[in-house]
């Protein structure tokens, strides 16, 4: 036989309405009474009827996590998104919230999925895991005043949007400075995305470090078309870099393989530093020197700030910066060739 609200109320010595209010965390109930009733619920193994509770509260008790269009193998296999979902799911469970994921191969389909989730009231709010300058999804969320938190820096309405991010410009600057401190002067920046805000911020930081050191800056080496991978050999011969700053670990592995194919050994000929400190940084030798962005904390804080909005405890835009940490491994060496 299943345990009911009446059973809990009887054992706790309170009214059934009091148990219902405790379940819904109603402010009219004292913390002492909440603790007593929750202890009885735990002892009896009582599990609230979430569907019934949501019907009364007009809530779905679910968070929507929006992934960027999974239109490339790099994005599809990027552990950043899986780690982010795991962190969000863990934090959401503390609020008795479930997690639903919205994904698609393109923005048009992604927007349709998010719109349906919103109109059908499948979720109470969303967490965007990316910031893209051609994204119609964030415009939809902002225009319709839907609670959402952005992991990343928005392109507009920064003062009105709640977002959690690293200081990506500082990340790019410190990555380049680390190479400069080890004697590197000809440093390139390699990326496979030019639409996400983290690219602009990290590239600006890279440029700033080189300019402050009185060293030449170079146009970002962009890998967006198949021909770009072939052209990379010519860039290496022309600019003769001794080091690379790469947009993330997953792409760094591919760049290292490409450089090796063209006869350049990492780190003997090319030092490499990247970002995220994901599982890819230690999958193959040499292990990649990388900046840890603390994905778990990004996901946790994004969830907390979304819950603040859902519970009407946060109405204005807010920016939360998560600290980062340099993890030194094997792909950067002291340059003695200059």
Image: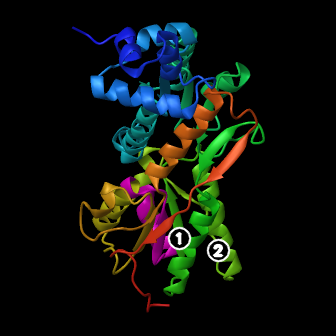
The correct choice, above or below, for 156 with respect to 3 in the image is below
Mark drawn on residue 209 = 2
Q: Which residue is drawn at 52% across and 16% down?
A: 18
Does the rendering let one see residue 131? no
**Position in image of residue 189 (x %, y %):** 53, 64
**Position in image of residue 215 (x %, y %):** 64, 80
**Position in image of residue 80 (x %, y %):** 41, 47
Does the rendering let one see residue 179? yes
Q: Residue at x 39, y 58 (%)?
A: 249
Residue 236 counted in the magenta span: yes
Write the start and end of the magenta stretch as one range.
230-250
**Position in image of residue 229 (x %, y %):** 41, 53
Rendering quarter of residue 269:
bottom left
Residue 245 counted in the magenta span: yes
Q: Earlier in the sequence, mark 2 or mark 1?
A: 1
Residue located beneath label 1 in the image: 175
Q: Which of 247 and 117 is in front in this view?
A: 117
Q: Which of 147 and 236 is in front in this view?
A: 147
Q: What element carries label 1?
A: helix
Q: Which of 308 and 38 is in front in this view?
A: 38
Mark drawn on residue 291 = none
Q: Residue at x 33, y 28 (%)?
A: 42
Which quadrant does the N terminus fall into? top left
Q: Counting other residues with Cα less than 10 Å from the Cα at mark 2, is it few (<14), some (14-19), or many (20 or more)?
A: many
Q: What element carries label 2?
A: helix
Q: In this view, does 72 lie to the left or right of 176?
A: left
Tags 2 and 1 in contact by the CB under 8 Å rule?
A: yes
Rendering quarter of residue 83:
top left
């Amino acid at each position: 036989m299943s345990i009911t609200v009446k059973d809990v109320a009887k054992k706790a010595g309170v009214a059934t309405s009091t148990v219902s209010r405790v379940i819904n965390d109603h402010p009219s109930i004292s913390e002492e009474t909440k603790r007593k009733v929750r202890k009885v619920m735990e002892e009896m193994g009582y599990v609230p009827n979430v569907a019934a509770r949501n019907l009364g509260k007009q809530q779905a008790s679910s968070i929507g996590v929006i992934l960027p269009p999974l239109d490339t193998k790099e994005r599809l296999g990027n552990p950043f998104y899986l780690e982010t979902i795991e962190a969000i799911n863990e934090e959401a469970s503390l609020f008795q919230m479930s997690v639903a994921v919205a994904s698609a191969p393109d923005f048009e389909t992604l927007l349709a999925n998010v719109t349906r989730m919103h109109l059908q009231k499948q979720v109470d709010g969303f967490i965007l895991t990316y910031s893209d300058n051609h994204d119609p999804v964030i415009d939809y969320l902002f225009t319709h005043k839907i609670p959402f938190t952005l992991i990343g820096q928005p392109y507009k309405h920064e003062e009105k949007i709640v977002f959690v991010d690293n200081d990506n410009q500082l990340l790019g600057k410190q990555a380049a400075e680390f190479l400069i401190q080890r004697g590197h002067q000809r440093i390139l920046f390699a990326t496979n995305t030019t639409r996400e805000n983290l690219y602009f911020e990290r590239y600006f930081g890279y440029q700033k470090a080189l300019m402050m050191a009185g060293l030449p800056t170079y146009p970002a080496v962009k890998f967006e078309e198949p021909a770009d991978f072939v052209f990379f050999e010519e860039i290496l011969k022309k600019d003769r870099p001794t080091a690379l700053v790469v947009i993330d670990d997953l792409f760094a592995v591919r760049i290292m393989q490409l450089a090796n194919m063209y006869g350049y050994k990492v780190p003997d000929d090319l030092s490499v530093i990247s970002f995220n400190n994901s599982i890819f940084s230690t999958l193959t030798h040499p292990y990649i020197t990388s900046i840890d962005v603390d994905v778990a904390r990004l996901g946790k804080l994004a969830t907390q700030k979304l819950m603040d909005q859902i519970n009407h405890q946060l109405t204005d835009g807010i920016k939360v910066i998560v600290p980062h940490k340099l993890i030194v491994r094997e792909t950067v060496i002291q340059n003695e060739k200059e």
